[in-house]
Amino acid sequence: MGASQQLVALLNQAGLSPSYQSIHTAIDSLANRSLEAARVAAAGPHVFCYDNIQISTSIFVEQTLNICPKVQSGTFAVIYELPHAKPEDVLLGPLLERERTAQLLELHDLWPSRESAQAYLWQTSVNIIKVLVNNVDTFSGYHNEPLLQNVARRKLPNGQKTTFHCLQASDIEEHSNMGNMLMHEDVYKTQLKLKSEDFEDCAIATIGDQMTNGRFCTIQEIRKLDINPWE
């Protein structure tokens, strides 16, 4: 929860809080450190994700013509590192060539292997049984039963954690094609301070919701006649 500048000043005078300026400086320093780390990560293979946000101000903030509206919409982006990927793995040329020469999918390409089918059946059975374990007192004693636990698939090494870097929230709304294009420009050109030639020959992986993925397909059609892979 936030607090007004006057309340922070009062708490500071009582020795219960750092000063407002100290808090502001600390937040600004943390934000800059996060951006610097994101710039290093974005120079190599990475995943770029973002989604819309809505920020509400306190009910005690007076609404006038000269301040932001009570609810502010925008977009929040995150850079995820790919620990086992090499720069050559994301070169755009080979990926596009593979796409051009790839064969059409057949039904047998989509069939699960025997191992995958057995794993799916097991995981589904466990998930169904857990509904009883979590909601019916008679079955609650089986909560830690080893035979009723999900089995890890492609388990990560012990201790490995996903490294991510938060970027600055933007007031750009990503619900339109233009908003998505402006968001890409804001992240890579303004925040990460990269030049087009730094990443125009590399593929940037993204994980988005269905609407965002649909926008990407539309943007690719819109920008087919661009002068280079970025602009």
Image: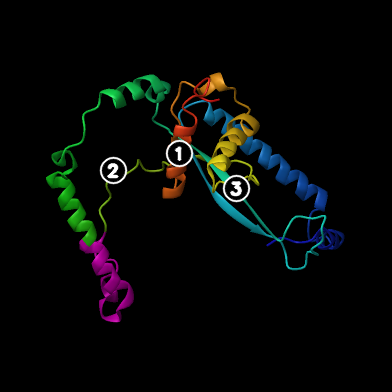
Residue behind mark 2: 154
Along the viewing direction, whichever of 167 and 23 lies nearer the viewer: 167
Q: Is 226 situated above or below 10?
A: above
Report the residue at 61% width, 31% height from top: 192
Cα–Cα span, label 2 and label 1: 34 Å
**Residue 136 lies within the magenta run:** yes
First in residue order: circle 3 vs circle 2: 2
* Nearer the observer, 157 or 25: 25
Residue corresponding to mark 1: 218
Q: Earlier in the sequence, mark 3 or mark 1?
A: 3
Amino acid at the residue labelled 3: Glu
Specify the amino acid type for callout 1.
Answer: Thr
How far, Cα to Cα, is label 3 from label 1? 17 Å
Q: How many discs appear?
A: 3
Which of the two residues, 107 or 188, is positioned nearer the viewer here? 107
- The image shows residue 51 at horizontal and vertical percentages of 53, 48
Report, in whole angstroms, how far the alpha carbon at label 3 lies from the one at label 2.
36 Å
Tell me, yes or no, whether the two marked residues, 2 and 1, touch with CB atoms within 8 Å: no
Q: Earlier in the sequence, mark 2 or mark 1?
A: 2
In the picture, the disc for residue 55 is: none
Classify 10 Å Cα crowding around label 3: few (below 14), some (14-19), many (20 and above). many
The image quadrant of residue 25 is: top right
